[in-house]
Image (cartoon, grey):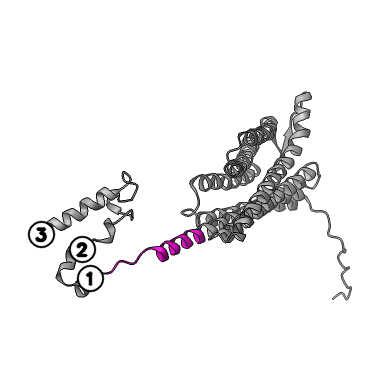
Amino acid sequence: MSDEVPAPLPNIAPVDNLLDLQLWTNGVTLASSLAQVLIVLIFLQEWNVLPSYLKWLGLGSLLSTLFASVSSIASNMNACDTLFVSGCYFYQLGKLLGWLTYLIRIWSLSGRNRSLLVISTCFGAFTMALNLSFCVRITGVRALPRLCAPALATSGTLDSFSDSAGPISMIFFPLYLAVIHVVYLRKFSKSSKLAVRAGMDGAHLKLQSFMNMFGRSVFVLVLEAVLLGAKNFLTGSTNAVLFFIALWGGQVFLDLAYVIYIKSFALDLRRASAGSTSNSDAEAPRKPSKDALLRNKGPGAASAWVPPVVTGFQKVDILGQGGKGMATVDMSRAFKSALDDSEA
């Protein structure tokens, strides 16, 4: 038996071989896909609370990025070119739907400022056109048995401009949306602080909710710009693992921040709904029961009693959408007259 001591392994890890590179790359992309599935499930928990436009655009954005990562794995394992290009389109669609949620909010909070909407839409359309041209010209080339790499065809000044301006525009457009959010955040905070000082009911809660919502929006937009910048910086890197970690790992982090923002927004909606319900219950006049009226005022009090459902403008379920759920004065009188006739 030999007493020789084995030589210690080197301090610096050896360079990955081709098999390690394929395992790392596909492992990172698969982890991204699984994480995005969980993120979609978290988003669906708030489905009934969110506004219609936000629920569909948000779900479309999350599903598009999920399909993009799945297409990337499928291109590595099967048809490289076709699935790689489809993944590019899915990725850009996810960005477009995510940006639309911010544009709709800016349109609403700016008092429907058409000039601002036109400028923002043109900037976003220009950015998306540059990146769609990238997807049109890109092809997938199999670099390793289980790794598909992009190859970009550049054949003119316009293509060169798109290649240089597209990544820059993808960074600056989220920053532009973040600046617009900050501008309207300051305007709203000033007006809301005046309302709080004036003692308006619920103004401080509205201010807190608005500040939280816009603060998280700005954080998500700035984070998106930083991650896109890191992805563009690593696009030309020879280390494919770093590129895929920046692309799909960063996308998971961004989707998670987006869902946290959505859940906080849904929580604010629940609080506002609960607050309005409690306030309406506190302000609603209490109606004495029929037995109490009969006991306190004698037999003649029965004709003076009217059910709460037909008095004033309280909600009535039987009227449906035609009456917008409210009983009119004429209907209240008709119901009361019918009750009096039946008792007579």
Query: Which quadrant of the rendered structure holds the C terminus?
Result: bottom left
Work out whether residue 320 or residue 312 is closer to the camera in this orientation and state it: 312
In contact (CB < 8 Å): disc 2 and disc 3:
no
Quickly name the residue at label 1.
293
Q: In the rendered image, which quarter is residue 256 located in?
A: bottom right
Say whether disc 2 or disc 3 marks the residue closer to the N-terminus: 2
Q: Amino acid at mark 3?
A: Ala
Work out whether residue 9 or residue 161 is closer to the camera in this orientation and state it: 161
Quickly name the residue at label 2.
304
Q: Amino acid at mark 1?
A: Leu
What span is in magenta?
270-288
CA separation in Å, label 2 and label 3: 12 Å
Say whether disc 1 or disc 3 marks the residue closer to the N-terminus: 1
Q: Is residue 308 above or below residue 51?
A: below
Tell me if residue 99 is in the magenta stretch. no
Residue 22 visible to an observer of this rendering: no
Q: Is residue 208 above or below residue 185?
A: below
In contact (CB < 8 Å): disc 1 and disc 2:
yes
Q: Secondary structure at mark 1?
A: helix
Q: Amino acid at mark 2?
A: Ala
| Residue 228 x, y percent position in the rendering | 73, 45
Q: Secondary structure at mark 3?
A: loop
**Residue count near mark 3 (Cα–Cα under 10 Å), binned few <14, some 14–19, many ≥20:** few
Q: Is residue 304 above or below residue 64?
A: below
| Residue 98 x, y percent position in the rendering | 61, 44
Quickly name the residue at label 3.
344
Work out whether residue 7 or residue 170 is closer to the camera in this orientation and state it: 170
**Residue count near mark 1 (Cα–Cα under 10 Å), binned few <14, some 14–19, many ≥20:** some
Say whether disc 1 or disc 2 marks the residue closer to the N-terminus: 1
Work out whether residue 252 or residue 169 is closer to the camera in this orientation and state it: 169
Say left or right for 231 vs 263: right
In contact (CB < 8 Å): disc 1 and disc 3:
no
